[in-house]
C-alpha cells in the first residue's frame, strides 16, 4: 500500500485466488473495493480518496480445497503482509480460524470452511505515508563500525528498560527508552558498539500460550514484516497511531547513532504466527497458502515444517524472496537500522535439494545495494534435514558460532564438573581453536581464508538458554513457570552448579562456593571478550542477571526475563570487570585481528602472530594438543600494527593450582593487566604495591586453579 497525491496504490499477491477485495474501515463500517487482476499473481488498483491513517484489510475469494493446499475463505479479514502499521490485537476465538473449530479450537483442518466473520478479531492494517515522517533521518548518521571493532549486545526492547528507575515511567519498556541517556551511558561505558534487538516486527502469541495465561515474550512469531510492534511504543505514540510509532522508533535509532551505537534487528523470515495446518487464518494462509508455505508434495497437502513452529515460508518461491528483500530494504532505508540477525537462516537458503549458499535469497541479500555495508548475521541452522550449517554462509555474512559456545562452556564448566568426579573431559585444543578464530569453520571459502575470524560471532549465552550467572549455579533447567512440566528447553546446557543447585546466600553453609561461581563467570566473560572474532553479550550478563534456572524464557514477560538495574556489591564488581575486559579488547589490536593466524612472524625479526606454550613455557607440540590432561596453556598474540602490541592470555582450567613459567623467547617484559582471581579490577593496585605486576619471560609463579590472566608486553 503506497500513498499517492490522489489516494493509494494497492497491490497484493494471491496467485490462486479468483478475486480479492480491499476492505476499508471507518468505525464499524466496511467498504469493499474489488481489485483488478491477477497479473502475474498480483491483484492491484489505484483507489482515490484514501488518506494516511485509513484502516484496511483484504478478503480473498477462491477455492476452498484444503487437500490441494487452497484455503480461500472471504469470511476472514486478512492482514496485508506489507502493512507499515497495524492496530488492534489478534483474537483467539473460533472466528480467527479458516476451518470450522469448536469452542476448544479443535476441528478438521481439511473440513469445511468457517463462515464466522473475523473482521473484529484480527488487527487492521493501516495506511502510513513514509514520505512525510517527522523524525530525523537515521540513515544519515550511521556509525559504520567495522566488524573488527564490533561488540554486540543482544537485548529485548521491553526487558532491557522496564525496571530501570533512571527512566521516566512512560519510557520504560519502549523504543524511546532505548535511547534514554542512562541506557546509552551504560552501553558506552560497558564498551559495546551495537545493540541487537530481539524481534520488533509485529508479532503475536501462540494460542497454546494464551490458553495458559502466558504470552510470546521474545517475539519469534511474526505477524507483519514491515510494521513495528506497537506494544513497544510509548502510550502517547500508540494513541497517535502507526506513523507516530514508526517515528518513535526512527528517533531512537537516530539517537543511538548519534552516540556511536549501531542498531541490529533479529528478524524472523522463516515462518509466521499462523502455525501449522490446524492454526489460525490471519494473512498469508488466506492470500495464497499454496504459494507462501512449504508443502511436502503429498496428498492431502501437508506443510513441510523445518522450523519447528508448524509452518515454513517457501524460499523456493520468488514471491517469498521478494517479500523478504522488500522488508529488509524498508528497515534499512526507512528505519535506518545497521544490520540484521537472521533467525534459522538455513531455511532462507533451502531449495529443492536442501540448503545452498548460492540460493537466490542468500545471493540477493549479499548483493542488495540497500544492504551494502550493513551487518548480516546468520543463525546457521534450522531443524530440517541437514540443518546444521555453521561456517557455510558466504561473505559478507557473519554467523553465530555455536561451536564456540559449546567449547567454552565445556572447558570452564562441564569438564571441571566431570573432573570433580574423576571423569575425563575435553581436550584443550578445541578451546584453542575457538580462541584463535575458528578457522576450521570459517576458513573454507573461495579463495580460502578470506572471511577471517570476524565471520565468527562468538557467544556463550543468548536469549535462548541459561544466563551466564545461571550457567554457574544450575546443573539442570528449571522451566516449570512455562507450563510444560519442564519438558521444554535444552538439556545440553554444559553448566556447573559448583556442588549446590540454585542460588546460595552468603549465610548458607555452602557459601564458600559463591566466590568460585563468580570467578567462573569472569572466566567465561573474559574468554568471550578476548577471543578472536566478534563477541556477542547477552543483556544483563555483565551484571549477573539470573532467570532462576529457566533456560527457555520465551513466554516469560515477568521478572524472570526483565533486566535488573539495582546492583548488589558483587554485581557492581562484575560490571566493573566487564568494562575493564572490553577496554582491553578495544585498546589492543592484538585482540582484534581481522585475518586468520598463520603462526608466522608478523615482520622481519618479529614474533609470530600466534604462538602456544604450555605451563612451563615450552612451545606446544602435536602430542600436547591431544593430551586430555593438559589444562594449562599460554596464548601469545601479536598484531602487525602497531609494532609493539603483544598480548598473552594464560589459562588454567585445572582444579589445582599450577606452577607457571612465563613464556616468550623474544625478550621484553610482561605486565599483568588482569587476573580472574580479582573480584574487582582495582585489585591490580594491590598487586602493583606488592611489586607483582611486572615479570620477565621465564619467571616462575603459581596460577590459581580455574583462573585466567592477561599479560601485555611492555
Image (cartoon, helix red, strand yellow):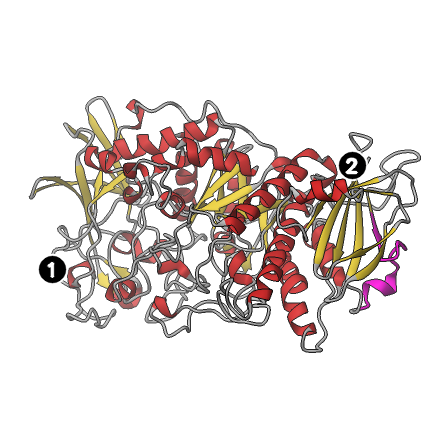
> For this view, does 130 lie left or right of residue 7?
right
Residue 433 placement, left or right of 238: right
Looking at the image, residue 608 sits to the left or right of residue 505; the answer is right
Image height check: is 340 above or below 335? below
Please tell me whether mark 1 sits on a helix, a strand or a loop.
Answer: loop
Q: In which quarter of the image is the C terminus?
A: top right
From the top left corner, tell me how far across and down residue 252 is, in percent. Answer: 38, 31
Mark 1 against mark 2, which lies toward the viewer? 2
Q: Name the residue under label 2.
A: 639
Q: Dot 2: within a 10 Å radius of its alpha carbon, few (fewer than 14), some, or many (20 or more) residues?
A: many
Toward the left, the furthest residue is 29
Above or below, 36 relative to 75: above
Look at the image and give the residue range highlighted in magenta.
611-627
Numbered tag placed on residue 116 in the rendering: 1
Asked whether 616 falls inside the magenta stretch, the response is yes
Residue drawn at 45 percent across, 67 percent down: 489
**Rendering quarter of residue 74:** bottom left
Identify the image quadrant of the N terminus: top left
On screen, residue 243 above or below 555: above
User: Nearest the camera: 79 or 664?
Assistant: 664
Comes first in the chain, label 1 or label 2: 1
> Is residue 24 inside the magenta stretch?
no
Q: Position of residue 67 (x, y in %)?
A: 28, 68
Q: In this view, does 277 lie to the left or right of 55?
A: right
Q: Residue at x 60, y 59 (%)?
A: 515
Amino acid at each position: 500500500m503506497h500513498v499517492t497525491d490522489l489516494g493509494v496504490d494497492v497491490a497484493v499477491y494471491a496467485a490462486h485466488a479468483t478475486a480479492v477485495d480491499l476492505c476499508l474501515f471507518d468505525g464499524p463500517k466496511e467498504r469493499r473495493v474489488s481489485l483488478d487482476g491477477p497479473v502475474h499473481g498480483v491483484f492491484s488498483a489505484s483507489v482515490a480518496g484514501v488518506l494516511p491513517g485509513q484502516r484496511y484489510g483484504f478478503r480473498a475469494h477462491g477455492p476452498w480445497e484444503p487437500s490441494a493446499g487452497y484455503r480461500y475463505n472471504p469470511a476472514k479479514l486478512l492482514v496485508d503482509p506489507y502493512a507499515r502499521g497495524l492496530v488492534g490485537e489478534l483474537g483467539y476465538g473460533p472466528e480467527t480460524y479458516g476451518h470450522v473449530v469448536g469452542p476448544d479450537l479443535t476441528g478438521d483442518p481439511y473440513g469445511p470452511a468457517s463462515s464466522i466473520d473475523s473482521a473484529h478479531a484480527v488487527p487492521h492494517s493501516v495506511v502510513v505515508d513514509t514520505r512525510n515522517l517527522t523524525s530525523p533521518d537515521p540513515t544519515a548518521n550511521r556509525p559504520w563500525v567495522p566488524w573488527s571493532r564490533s561488540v554486540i549486545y543482544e537485548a529485548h526492547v521491553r526487558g532491557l528498560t522496564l525496571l530501570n528507575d533512571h527512566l521516566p515511567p512512560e519510557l520504560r519498556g519502549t523504543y524511546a527508552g532505548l535511547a534514554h541517556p542512562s541506557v546509552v551511558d551504560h552501553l558506552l561505558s560497558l564498551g559495546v558498539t551495537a545493540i541487537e534487538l530481539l524481534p520488533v516486527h509485529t508479532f503475536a502469541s501462540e494460542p497454546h500460550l494464551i490458553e495458559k495465561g502466558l504470552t510470546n515474550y521474545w517475539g519469534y512469531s511474526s505477524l507483519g514484516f514491515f510494521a513495528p510492534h506497537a506494544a513497544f511504543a510509548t502510550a502517547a505514540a500508540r494513541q497517535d497511531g502507526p506513523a507516530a510509532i514508526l517515528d518513535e522508533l526512527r528517533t531512537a535509532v537516530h539517537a543511538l547513532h548519534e552516540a556511536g551505537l549501531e542498531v541490529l534487528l533479529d528478524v524472523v523470515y522463516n515462518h509466521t504466527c499462523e502455525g501449522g495446518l490446524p492454526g489460525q487464518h490471519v494473512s498469508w494462509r488466506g492470500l495464497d497458502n499454496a504459494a507462501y508455505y512449504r508443502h511436502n508434495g503429498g496428498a492431502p497437502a501437508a506443510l513441510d515444517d523445518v522450523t519447528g513452529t508448524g509452518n515454513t515460508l517457501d524460499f523456493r518461491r520468488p514471491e517469498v524472496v521478494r517479500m523478504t528483500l522488500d522488508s529488509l530494504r524498508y528497515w534499512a532505508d526507512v528505519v535506518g537500522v545497521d544490520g540484521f540477525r537472521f533467525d534459522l537462516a538455513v531455511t532462507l537458503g533451502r531449495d529443492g535439494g536442501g540448503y545452498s549458499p548460492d540460493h537466490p535469497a542468500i545471493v540477493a541479500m549479499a548483493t542488495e545495494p540497500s544492504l551494502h555495508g550493513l551487518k548480516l548475521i546468520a543463525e546457521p541452522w534450522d531443524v530440517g534435514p541437514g540443518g546444521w550449517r555453521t561456517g557455510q554462509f558466504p561473505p559478507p555474512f557473519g554467523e553465530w558460532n555455536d561451536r564456540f559456545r559449546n567449547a567454552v562452556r565445556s572447558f570452564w564448566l562441564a569438564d571441571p564438573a566431570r573432573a570433580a568426579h574423576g571423569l575425563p573431559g575435553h581436550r584443550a585444543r578445541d578451546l584453542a581453536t575457538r580462541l584463535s578464530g575458528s578457522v576450521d569453520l570459517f576458513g573454507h571459502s573461495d579463495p580460502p581464508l578470506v572471511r577471517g575470524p570476524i565471520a565468527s560471532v562468538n557467544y556463550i549465552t543468548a536469549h535462548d538458554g541459561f544466563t551466564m550467572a545461571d550457567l554457574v549455579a544450575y546443573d539442570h533447567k528449571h522451566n516449570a513457570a512455562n507450563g510444560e512440566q519442564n519438558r521444554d528447553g535444552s538439556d545440553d546446557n554444559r553448566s556447573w552448579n559448583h556442588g549446590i543447585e540454585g542460588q546460595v546466600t552468603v549465610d548458607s553453609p555452602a557459601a564458600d562456593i559463591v566466590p568460585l561461581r563468580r570467578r567462573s563467570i569472569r572466566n567465561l566473560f573474559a574468554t568471550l571478550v578476548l577471543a578472536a572474532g566478534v563477541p556477542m553479550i547477552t543483556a544483563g550478563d555483565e551484571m549477573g542477571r539470573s532467570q532462576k534456572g529457566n533456560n527457555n524464557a520465551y513466554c516469560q514477560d515477568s521478572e524472570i526475563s526483565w533486566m535488573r538495574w539495582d546492583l548488589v556489591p558483587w554485581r557492581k564488581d562484575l560490571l566493573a570487570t566487564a568494562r575493564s575486559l572490553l577496554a582491553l579488547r578495544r585498546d589492543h589490536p592484538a585482540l582484534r585481528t581481522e585475518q586468520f593466524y598463520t603462526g608466522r612472524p608478523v615482520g622481519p625479526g618479529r614474533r609470530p602472530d600466534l604462538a602456544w606454550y604450555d605451563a612451563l613455557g615450552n612451545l606446544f607440540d602435536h602430542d600436547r594438543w591431544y593430551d586430555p590432561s593438559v589444562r594449562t596453556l599460554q596464548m601469545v598474540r601479536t598484531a602487525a600494527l602497531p609494532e609493539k602490541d603483544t598480548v598473552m592470555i594464560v589459562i588454567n582450567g585445572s582444579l589445582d593450582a599450577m606452577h607457571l613459567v612465563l613464556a616468550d623467547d623474544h625478550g621484553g617484559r610482561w605486565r599483568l593487566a588482569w587476573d580472574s582471581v580479582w573480584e574487582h579490577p582495582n585489585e591490580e593496585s594491590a598487586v602493583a604495591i606488592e611489586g607483582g605486576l611486572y615479570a620477565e619471560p621465564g619467571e616462575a609463579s603459581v596460577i590459581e586453579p580455574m583462573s585466567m590472566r592477561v599479560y601485555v608486553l611492555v
